[in-house]
Image (spheres, helix red, strand yellow):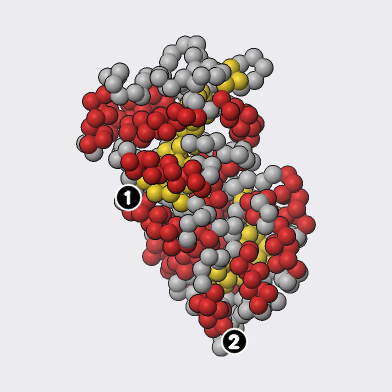
């Protein structure tokens, strides 16, 4: 299968060739023909599968092949995303894929000045990428007209419908022509959300590249039981061992993420935090520092990290478990991409046992639970009627991660000094440390 055989416009094929996309990904192969045929589409795909191109390419194809030369520009495609970062990222992708397509696009989101957005909108665009709140502001001012929209695309739709955006989405939907085509993409589909989505879609076709609520098969999951107060030390130990990797760490609160990033910095680990309280430019700078390797650790809240395109991430650490179990799926969507192996490590305090159980239910699998020596929690972590972990599971124990007591001590010391060991040795040790053991 090639992009040519999908029948995409030459201007798009040229852009794809320039950026080096040789073949379409599974979600692209499934979604693009259906979208090009004009169907409404419910797309289930994790971040990292190429879902942005799966909706952007058929949209750019439709708009560019039906454009009327010389006609004034009007908004023909509206793309809604839940976060500013995702809006910027989607817009960047559209510019990349559509660079030879002679279409104008812009992105509008809260937290940025109104005037530049008003200027661009006044000049006219074909494609508008927006977060719901800021779009409502523009609708109220009359600076955006949606009566000519032919395509509506909702990215990370479950989050938008789930997290309080529904009233805004309904107001926006009321302004759109009923005849439009709707594409809805999401990593997970809870039944209630799917039902809601069906209300505003017409006979949608469904495409799914991973089974419902499943996560990349190439990802190894592991949970370390540990008291909340000791999580930071354990995290620093793990980071010290994994000094060659860039790591995304998830925290629960904005304040907690900030504090953790500061504490990591104090321990000599370059870290940046990204969350909703940071300004747009601060968030983009933090992401840029992480992407360029200036920062080795990115500490993020779920909302801020959602949909961010962070390539080749070998490890995601859940410093706090997510309050909503489905977010676990989103979080680890950042690792194990495109067949690369990845790891997801969760630090689980006794208070979080219920959250871990909820994650097991969503995953339909239990996460291996191993205790790191020296970090056994003071209370049992109860995982079910007949199983528990108090940090003393039967059978083999995890090798210690603590510096003073183990054979790994010199490596830790080197790690802090920035020295490197042989990658193969590093991999061997990692396998030993993370050998999964199922929770009964
Ligand atoms: P997404 O799931 O849209 O966030 O895409 C994940 C990553 O895959 C992005 O870095 C894209 O640039 C890249 N990508 C998307 N489609 C392809 C493709 N057909 N070939 C190679 N890379 C791709």
Left or right: residue 60 compared with residue 182: left
Q: Determine the residue positioned at 63% across, 51% down.
A: 159
Q: Nearer the viewer, mark 2 or mark 1?
A: 1
x, y percentage for residue 298?
Answer: 41, 46
> Dot 1, how many residues are within 10 Å of its Cα: few (below 14), some (14-19), or many (20+)?
few
- Judging by the rendered image, the residue that carries numbered circle 1 is 293
- Judging by the rendered image, the residue that carries numbered circle 2 is 71
Q: Are marks 2 and 1 in contact (CB under 8 Å)?
A: no
Q: Determine the residue positioned at 50% across, 65% down.
A: 91
Q: Secondary structure at mark 2?
A: loop
Left or right: residue 254 compared with residue 38: left
Q: Measured along the vertical axis of the image, is residue 224 above or below residue 288? A: above
Q: Can residue 339 be seen from the camera position used here?
A: no
Q: Measured along the vertical axis of the image, is residue 85 above or below residue 225? A: below
x, y percentage for residue 414?
Answer: 23, 32
Q: Measured along the vertical axis of the image, is residue 126 above or below residue 254? A: below
Q: Determine the residue positioned at 59% across, 87% down.
A: 71
Give the mark, 2 or 1, whose residue is nearer the N terminus: 2
Q: Measured along the vertical axis of the image, is residue 112 above or below residue 156? A: below
Mark 2 CB within 8 Å of ligand 1: no
């Amino acid at each position: 299968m090639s992009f040519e055989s999908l029948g995409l416009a030459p201007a798009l094929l040229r852009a794809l060739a320039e950026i080096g996309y040789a073949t379409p990904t599974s979600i692209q192969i499934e979604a693009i023909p259906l979208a090009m045929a004009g169907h409404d589409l419910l797309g289930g795909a994790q971040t990292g599968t190429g879902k942005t191109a799966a909706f952007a390419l058929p949209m750019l194809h439709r708009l560019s092949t039906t454009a009327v030369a010389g006609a004034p520009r009007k908004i023909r495609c509206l793309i809604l995303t839940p976060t500013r970062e995702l809006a910027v990222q989607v817009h960047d992708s559209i510019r990349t894929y559509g660079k030879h397509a002679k279409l104008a696009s812009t992105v509008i989101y809260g937290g940025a000045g109104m005037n530049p957005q008003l200027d661009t909108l006044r000049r006219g665009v074909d494609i508008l990428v927006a977060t719901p709140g800021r779009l409502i502001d523009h609708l109220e001012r009359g600076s955006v007209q949606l009566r000519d929209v032919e395509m509506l695309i909702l990215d990370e739709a479950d989050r938008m419908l789930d997290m309080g955006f529904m009233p805004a989405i309904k107001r926006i939907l009321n302004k759109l022509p009923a005849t439009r085509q709707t594409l809805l993409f999401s990593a997970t589909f809870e039944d209630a959300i799917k039902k809601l989505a069906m209300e505003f879609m017409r006979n949608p076709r469904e495409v799914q590249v991973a089974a419902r609520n499943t996560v990349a098969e190439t990802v190894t999951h592991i949970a370390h039981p540990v008291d909340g107060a000791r999580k930071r030390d354990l995290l620093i130990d793990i980071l010290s061992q994994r000094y060659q990797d860039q790591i995304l760490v998830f925290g629960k609160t904005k304040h907690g993420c900030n504090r953790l990033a500061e504490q990591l910095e104090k321990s000599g680990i370059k870290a940046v935090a990204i969350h909703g309280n940071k300004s747009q430019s601060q968030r983009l700078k933090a992401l840029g520092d992480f992407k360029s390797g200036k920062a080795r650790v990115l500490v993020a809240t779920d909302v801020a990290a959602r949909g961010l395109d962070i390539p080749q991430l070998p490890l995601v650490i859940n410093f706090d478990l997510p309050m909503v179990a489905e977010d676990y799926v989103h979080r680890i969507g950042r690792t194990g991409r495109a067949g690369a192996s990845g790891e997801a490590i969760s630090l689980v305090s006794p208070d979080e046992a219920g959250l871990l159980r909820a994650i097991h239910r969503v995953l339909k699998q239990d996460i291996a639970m191993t205790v790191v020596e020296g970090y056994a929690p003071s209370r049992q972590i109860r995982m079910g009627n007949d199983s528990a972990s108090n940090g003393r599971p039967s059978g083999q124990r995890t090798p210690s991660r603590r510096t003073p007591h183990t054979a790994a001590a010199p490596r830790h010391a080197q790690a802090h000094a920035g020295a490197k060991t042989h990658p193969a040795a590093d991999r061997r040790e990692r396998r030993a440390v993370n050998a999964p053991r199922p929770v009964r």
